[in-house]
Amino acid sequence: MNDNRTIRVSVGTAAALGLVNVRCDILPSTAYLMTCGGCVSRCAFCAQARSSNSSEALLSRVSWPEFPIEQVLDALARGNSILQRVCVQVTSTSTARKTTKELVSDMIKIRQACGFAHQISLSYHPSSVSDVESLFALGVDRIGIALDAATQRIHERTKAGSGSWAGTLRLIEESSARFPGRISTHLIVGLGETEEELVNIIQHMKDLGITIGLFAFTPVKGTPMERVPQPQPDTYRRVQIARHLITGGYVTAQDFSFANGRILDVGLAPETLRKLISDGAPFETSGCPDCNRPYYNERPGGVTFNYPRSLTEAEIQNCILEAKLEGLETEDTPRGSKGR
Ligand code: SF4
């Protein structure tokens, strides 16, 4: 390969690949790449949106320096025991589809030539199911179609210029029926929705066999939502627990009770609930296998919304207490075995 194409690489990924000399206390287990050129949509929370004044080198809290594609592919081809997956975040531009196809084709060639074992995810807004089909035909393993907003109302308020919520939902439904078990979605907690709305959409995604990645809304300077606070930790913990219980098949949305949209009860006895969450898994980063997104939503010293690794016993206890669910307020019940 010999060309001038470039791609953005999350700074943690660049460190893991040896492209930059930056010390990271936790490295990503997925290589996060992003197509260049910003995005034609106007999502009010996103630094890549054309309505944003933030640096194009930002997505959420993470900076994404730009490198020649050839250099990144060479680094991936050398192999890396930390990185298990490659995820390409495709921003919506007129050239994104072409760039993505070329990039994926190159990665597949490298994978075949050097036994490069990484799975490939695309975080992409396809135009149709046949678009999804053509990307899977190239050799992509999973496609993430972000819903972001839990409802039509939240979508209209925060995702101008990115089609309709119902249209994205329909694409997700049709794609998951055509490619069962290979579609992921992202939901952002803290855009103004209720916990009940999140529980309902999580259940719908579970029924479709879709993998759900939860994100905590993160204000980025220069975006229309720069002054909106992050979700409260108790809300985020309850939604993480709800996701874990619903996707694990332990309960359904019907089992929950709510007060003014807040989760009051998950429909399990406290001791059963504690047992199901005591390994800390609900509080780890969720999404495609091996996707840990370190510091995507977190600032140093602040709340760790998504843990990019197994939690310690103390962290598990803290998360359980933060959830403020009835019957979980004390620390003196037995804990699971995970953690250090
Ligand atoms: S869950 Fe992670 S690997 Fe999967 S599409 Fe989202 S960011 Fe990429």
Image (spheres, rainbow, N blue to C red):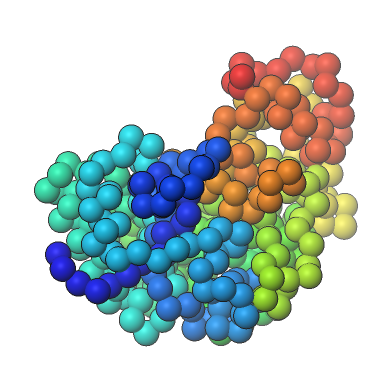
Percent position of residue 41, x then y:
53, 81
Which residue is pictured at 17% across the width and 52% down the height? Answer: 110
Residue placed at 23% from the left, 62% from the top?
Answer: 70
State the residue at coordinates (20%, 61%).
Answer: 106
Q: Is residue 257 visible?
A: no
Residue 50: image location, x then y, percent: 55, 83
Expressed as whole percent of the image width and height from the top left, the position of residue 221 reads: 69, 71
Q: Is residue 109 visible?
A: yes
Q: Residue at x 47, y 44 (%)?
A: 28
Count of numbered badges drawn on the protein: 0
The x and y percentages for residue 231 are 76, 56
| 305 vs 102: above or below | above
Q: Is residue 150 rendered to the left or right of residue 162?
A: right
Q: Is residue 248 left or right of residue 191?
A: left
The front one of 50 and 320 is: 50
Question: Which residue in the rendered view is the most extreme toward the left?
Answer: 113
Which residue is at the front of the view, 179 or 149? 149
Residue 194, by quadrant, is bottom right
* 323 left or right of 245 in image: right
Quarter of the figure that contains the N terminus: bottom left
- Hey, which quadrant is residue 272 in on the image? top right
Vertical placement of residue 271 versus 172, above or below: above
- Quarter of the figure that contains the C terminus: top right
